[in-house]
Amino acid sequence: MASWRALQRRERAWDSPFLSPCWARSVELARGDDGVRVAVMSEGGEPRAFLSANVGRITAIAAGGAMSDYEGVVGDPGPNFDPARLLRALGVDRYDFSHILEEQAEFAPYAKGREASWIIDVADGYDAYAAERRTAGTALKEIDRKRRKVEREIGPTVFAARSLCRAGFERLIALKRAQYRATGQTDIFDAGWTLRLLEDLFALRFPGFGGALYTLHFGDTLAAAQFHLMGETTIHAWMIAHEPEFERYSPGLLLFQDILRWMDDTPYDRLDLGYGDYRFKRELSNAQATLMHGYVGAFSPASLLRGAAYGVRQAAEALPLGRVSELPGKAMRRLDLLRGLR
């Protein structure tokens, strides 16, 4: 674990908590099985790189599956590294990846598409970030306006960082589950181990890794709660929810603003909002990371099936059919979500 964490510190992008050995261990404990495995790439008996994965009988996916926003190799596996070697190390016919950094060029030949992860970099402090964002757009001006509106109509906004409030944590879970039902999405907590994972991370007190609860109250009433994963210098936005009655005040955005201000007095200078093309991410972010999705496969029925699915998806997306063109991609992502929750 010490070698792995030392490698993480060499590249800023590797500071993602999803790439930490602590993440792989947390997933393993929450799942309570032997599905999490680590491929170690060594030279002369010394580890050069690590990759963690959830391994099934035939295929492998990111450790944590649907709960993970980043995956890939941490370290330098060497100039002649071919990701196909991972299949032998993991004992599978196919490795499906969804969120590998584009900088990991060895995976580029296996990529089938790319998307952005939206990042807020506050290395120069919140004030410098806010000045730049206000010049670029109106998002922060609108957030400031809504905060004044809340304080005028309801009461002061009260922010808590790294809160230990059990009631706030449980309310966040309840709000997320209600959100899944209302939008017809899969309730990720039905899997059981996923809820244990959040519970364990909420209780974890470990330097450089863990979960942290952030809350925002309007007066004495909880308005929004967020549970994020913590690296050594990066916070990864993960579970966010707000009370529906306060929707018009955008309490989630107010809470993000409070977190960014709080970061000035901490070692954290990057808030990763994750993938997904949402307006608030576009407007708040000032940096991006490009993520690749695709698969590495040996010649096998499993690889042929995945290749055929991507073929249908890419053919549909090339047609000018609007939302119909998106259906195969949505179906693949839904199936991968369910696989990742098993």
Image (cartoon, rainbow, N blue to C red):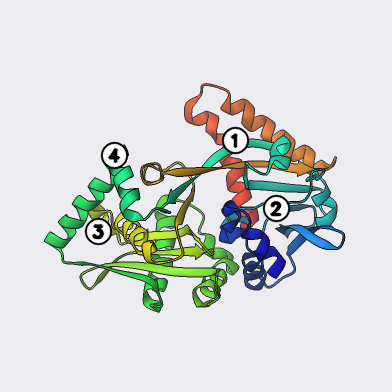
Look at discs 1 and 3 and give the one toward the viewer: 3
Q: Position of residue 328 (x, y in %)?
A: 59, 35
Residue ID for mark 3: 246
Which circle's residue, 1 or 4, is located before the other in the chain?
Answer: 4
Picture quadrant of residue 177: bottom left
Residue 275 vs 14, above or below: the answer is above
Residue located at (56% from left, 72% from top):
196
Q: Is residue 315 above or below residue 66?
A: above
* Label 3 Cα neighbours within 10 Å, binned few <14 / some 14-19 / many ≥20: some
Q: As rendered, which of 93 and 339 lies closer to the eye?
A: 93
Q: CA distance from mark 2 to mark 3?
A: 42 Å
The numbered mark at residue 135 is 4
Mark 4 is on which residue type? Thr
| Residue at which label 1 appears | 328
Q: CA distance from mark 3 to mark 4?
A: 28 Å
The quadrant of the picture occupied by the N terminus is bottom right
Residue at the extreme left of the image, as rendered: 152
Q: Which tag is nearer the camera, tag 1 or tag 4?
A: 4
Q: Is residue 89 left or right of residue 247?
A: right
Mark 2 sits on what residue? Answer: 73
